Image: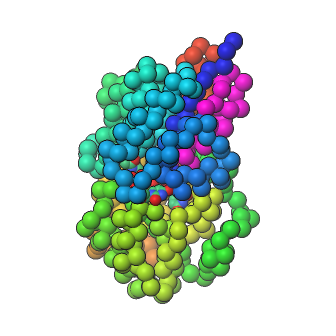
């Protein structure tokens, strides 16, 4: 029997981290020819992930430009995907999550009448401008997809409310599969600056921030709150690997450069980031991926957004939404830095997002869909 040609399409850092273990799982299956196509919506940040996980793309659209707009990303992806699909002839295309690459990859598959599997399906805030443009991207992909790989039962329930019930699987999030390969107790950082941090002596606050809906005043407020937190706590070191977006770079430097206990550093390779998270005290972020990883590592998270599509860890008590207002961020961070009881109440490991077997379930579900295997069991925390 001919092998199924399954093409994974991704372009940004988080998609790459979450798709890398899946690409490898597919490649390990005898019945599947795993094809890896990158749009390179991110260039350096994508290449770093490819290197960490040892992936070599079969096709690279190389679309990134500085300060790219949503329209240019989408149109360049669409145009580039035509040739990739015609040459590589996939039986199914897998897209991940909610980026512009995700949406354009799914739309392109539809134009070529190729089936679509949506990895990390069913996340919702129900606010079309927050996260922007991600909420709309994932809703549009829901309309196009044939198979839906939901990280959690809650995500499946979201799809059910939209009358999407066929081809839906609860698999866990592949990010937990990735974490299991990167985090090690005896890990030594490639970066000397990270090896020298005063773990145990001072409280390491790990920060990231990049969302488009926070560009402008919210991001100014977030950065000045972070500056205030660092200046008023001699017992913390704030480590902030700054996203390469020029908008974010400018804002972060304006508020945080030159503060003694602030480390503004370039984006970290995924394995460095995961191991730093495993050693830090507290995470402050607007990232989706960090909200999933930190709970698995027992680290409390303050989410600098107005909403989250990841309520599971909020319900488990290890993640709190602190919003984007200066005074709220400062107040909630102060509490977790200064009040050991408040900290202890949040600092416990929970695993609502996966058990490390998401990729196995997704590969099994694809084979089941094509009549070549058993339907996988659902992930249950
Ligand atoms: C994108 C995704 C967002 C995801 C985020 C993860 C969209 C619309 N947004 O947002 O959902 O959470 O990635 O990080 O799909 N840049 C570089 N080198 C890189 C990466 C980015 O220079 O390796 C700079 C470029 O100037 C680029 C800019 O960052 O134009 C913004 O990148 P873009 O992909 O448009 O948006 P993100 O904010 O990264
Ligand atoms: N990450 C990384 N290096 C960094 C910052 C983040 O490897 O300097 C990882 C992080 O551990 C997570 C993913 O990138 O796996 C999250 O990506 P990002 O925050 O850019 O996007 P989001 O998850 O918000 O879409």
On the image, which quarter does residue 320 sit in? bottom left
Numbered circles on residues, count: 0
Residue 78 x/y as whole percent: 40, 34
Q: Is residue 126 above or below residue 94?
A: below
* Residue 93 against residue 155 in the figure, above or below: above
Image side of residue 357 versus residue 236, left or right: right
Q: Is residue 11 visible?
A: no
Q: Nearer the viewer, residue 232 or 154?
A: 232
Residue drawn at x 61%, y 80% is: 198
Residue 177 sits in quarter: top right
The question of residue 21 being in magenta is answered with yes
Could you tell me if residue 81 is visible in this image? yes
With respect to residue 300, does 316 lie above or below?
above
- In the picture, measured across the screen, residue 84 lies left or right of residue 336, that is right
> Would you place residue 55 above or below residue 216 in this image?
above
Q: Does residue 235 appear to the left or right of 194 in the view shown?
A: left
Query: Where, quadrant-wise, is the C terminus in this rendering?
Result: top right
Query: Which portion, as a residue range, is magenta?
Result: 14-35
Is residue 295 within the magenta segment?
no
Measuring from the top left, give residue 120's x and y in whole percent.
Answer: 47, 39
Look at 41% across and 34% down and name the residue there. 79
Furthest residue in direction right, as rendered: 186
Rendering coords of residue 219 (x, y %): 32, 67
Which corner quadrant of the image does residue 144 belong to? Answer: top left
């Amino acid at each position: 029997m001919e092998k199924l040609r399954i093409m994974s399409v991704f372009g940004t850092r988080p998609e790459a981290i979450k798709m890398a273990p899946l690409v490898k799982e597919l490649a390990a299956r005898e019945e599947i020819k795993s094809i890896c196509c990158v749009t390179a919506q991110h260039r350096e940040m994508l290449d770093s992930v490819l290197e960490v996980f040892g992936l070599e793309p079969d096709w690279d659209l190389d679309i990134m430009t500085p300060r790219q707009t949503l329209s240019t990303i989408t149109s360049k992806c669409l145009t580039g995907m035509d040739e990739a699909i015609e040459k590589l002839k996939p039986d199914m295309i897998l897209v991940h999550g909610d980026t512009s690459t995700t949406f354009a990859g799914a739309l392109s598959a539809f134009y070529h009448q190729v089936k679509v599997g949506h990895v990390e399906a069913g996340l919702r805030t129900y606010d079309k401008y927050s996260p922007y443009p991600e909420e709309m991207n994932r809703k549009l992909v829901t309309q196009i997809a044939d198979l839906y790989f939901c990280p959690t039962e809650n995500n499946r329930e979201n799809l059910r409310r939209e009358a999407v019930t066929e081809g839906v699987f609860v698999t866990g999030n592949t990010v937990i599969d990735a974490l299991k390969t990167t985090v090690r107790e005896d890990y030594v950082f490639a970066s000397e600056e990270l090896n020298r941090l005063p773990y145990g002596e001072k409280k390491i606050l790990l920060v990231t921030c990049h969302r488009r809906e926070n560009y402008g005043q919210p991001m100014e407020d977030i950065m000045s709150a972070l500056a205030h937190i660092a200046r008023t706590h001699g017992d913390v070191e704030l480590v902030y690997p700054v996203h390469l977006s020029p908008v974010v770079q400018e804002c972060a430097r304006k508020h945080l450069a030159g503060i003694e206990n602030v480390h503004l550093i370039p984006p970290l390779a995924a394995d460095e980031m995961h191991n730093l998270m495993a050693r830090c005290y507290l995470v402050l972020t607007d990232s989706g991926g960090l909200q999933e990883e930190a709970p698995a590592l027992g680290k409390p998270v303050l989410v600098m957004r107005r909403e989250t599509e990841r309520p599971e860890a909020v319900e488990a008590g290890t993640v709190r939404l602190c919003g984007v207002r200066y005074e709220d961020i400062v107040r909630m961070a102060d509490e977790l830095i200064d009040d050991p009881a408040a900290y202890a109440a949040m600092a416990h490991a929970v695993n609502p997002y996966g058990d490390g077997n998401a990729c196995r379930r997704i590969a099994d579900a694809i084979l089941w869909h094509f009549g070549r295997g058993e339907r996988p069991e659902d992930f249950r925390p």
